[in-house]
């Protein structure tokens, strides 16, 4: 841990870094592992087949932290990878989680999910709602397939339609492009939604290029003054690190990270219990923090 180091606390100019002091725990994310059936060159997690940078979370890892989270006011569990359904424990974990809280799964909605469709469909009757967010990077299927493999746009779209038809709430994640008009970029998905039988108003979450894990990006440093000069209290409250944590298994050990975007920097491993991690102030040192600061980027659907 180096959270008392100058680098954590101060910008290179010596100004106190902007920070978030976590206020609550609305959602607990689990990183299911960076093993993925796809190999997308832009993946912010660097996920690919057989990858082990972040290891598979097990049911035994999940259970104590999930139980610790419930009485802390937790509203939902969320899961991201890699591809969550590559993880052999995913269905067992969801089975437990859905008896206690609503769950969100970020997935590419290709073979790993399709192969477990019968078990997943059974969750339509679970005590809490299960939602899926499916990556459709671009509205042009060829561009999506250039990153994710031929035929995968239509495969994911068909799976989305099937999940919606079964009663699950679905959303999509797309990639932002320089100079885009967001409303136009979103509207270009309408014909695909119609084809899959999805509602016109299906939620679309767009993300900037977060770059590969370990990248050093040149972005402005965020000082303590920036946080109050440019943001309202409500905007600061909406930072994921204010109301969530992500469980990550690395090198055989579990860590609680400040959010879904900083698992490549060990400074953001805030401890091994939620009680401990909730006390830790999170400075905006990571280059991806700038996306939260400047664009309100968030993986949350809360
Ligand atoms: S990336 Fe965003 S949510 Fe994560 S620690 Fe930085 S500011 Fe907080």
Image: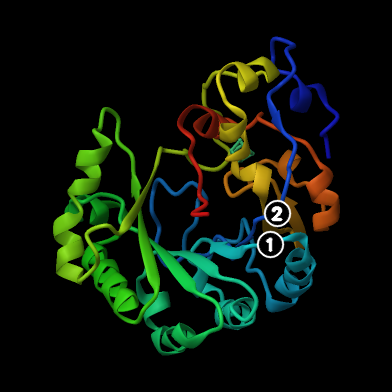
Position of 149 relative to 163 (above/below): above
Q: Can residue 244 be seen in this view?
A: yes
Classify residue 64 as left or right of residue 158.
Answer: right
Residue 90, horizontal then vertical, whole percent: 57, 77
Residue 158 located left or right of residue 221:
left
Asked which quadrant contains residue 70, the reply is bottom right
As rendered, which of 243 and 162 lies closer to the eye?
243
Task: Decide if residue 222 is in sight here.
Answer: no
- Give the x, y percent position of residue 86: 50, 73
Residue beneath disc 2: 25
Could you give the CA–CA distance between mark 1 and mark 2, rounded to whole angstroms?
6 Å
Q: Report helix, strand or loop for mark 1.
A: loop
Ligand 1 lies in quarter? top right
Relative depth, front residue between 38 and 279: 279
Q: What element carries label 2?
A: loop
Mark 1 surroundings: few (<14), some (14-19) or many (≥20) residues within 10 A? some
Quadrant that contains the N terminus:
top right
Residue that appears at 41% across and 86% down: 121
Q: Which residue is tagged 1?
A: 74
Q: Are marks 1 and 2 in contact (CB under 8 Å)?
A: yes
Residue located 52% across and 50% down the image: 45
Q: Residues within 10 Å of mark 2 (few under 14, many from 20)?
A: many
For image coordinates 26% across by 53% down, the residue present is 144
The x, y position of residue 68, in whole percent, is: 80, 66
The residue shown at (17%, 48%) is 188
Q: Position of residue 284 (x, y in %)?
A: 65, 30
From this view, report whether residue 64 is shown above or below residue 261: below
């Amino acid at each position: 841990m180096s959270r008392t180091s100058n680098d954590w606390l101060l910008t290179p100019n010596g100004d106190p870094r902007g920070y978030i002091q976590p206020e609550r725990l609305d959602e607990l994310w689990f990183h299911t592992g960076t093993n993925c059936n796809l190999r997308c060159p832009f993946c912010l997690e660097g996920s690919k087949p057989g990858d082990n940078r972040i290891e598979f979370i097990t049911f035994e890892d999940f259970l104590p932290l999930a139980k610790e989270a419930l009485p802390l006011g937790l509203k939902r569990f969320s899961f991201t990878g890699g591809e969550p359904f590559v993880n052999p424990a995913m269905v067992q974990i969801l089975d437990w989680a859905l008896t206690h809280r609503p769950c969100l799964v970020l997935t590419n909605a290709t073979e790993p999910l399709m192969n477990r469709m019968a078990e997943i469909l059974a969750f339509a009757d679970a005590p809490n709602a299960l939602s899926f967010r499916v990556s459709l990077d671009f509205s042009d299927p060829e561009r999506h397939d250039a990153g994710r493999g031929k035929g995968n746009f239509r495969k994911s779209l068909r799976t989305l339609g099937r999940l919606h038809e079964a009663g699950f709430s679905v959303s999509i994640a797309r990639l932002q492009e320089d100079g885009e008009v967001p409303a136009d970029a979103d509207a270009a998905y309408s014909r695909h939604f119609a084809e899959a039988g999805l509602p016109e108003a299906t939620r679309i979450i767009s993300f900037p290029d977060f770059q590969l894990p370990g990248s050093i990006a040149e972005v402005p440093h965020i000082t303590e003054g920036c946080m109050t000069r440019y943001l309202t209290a409500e905007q600061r409250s909406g930072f994921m690190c204010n109301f969530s944590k992500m469980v990550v298994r690395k090198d055989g050990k579990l860590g609680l990270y400040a959010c879904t975007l900083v698992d490549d920097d060990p400074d953001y491993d805030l401890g091994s219990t939620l009680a401990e991690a909730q006390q830790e102030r999170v400075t905006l040192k990571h280059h991806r923090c700038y996306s939260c600061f400047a664009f309100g980027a968030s993986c949350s659907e809360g």
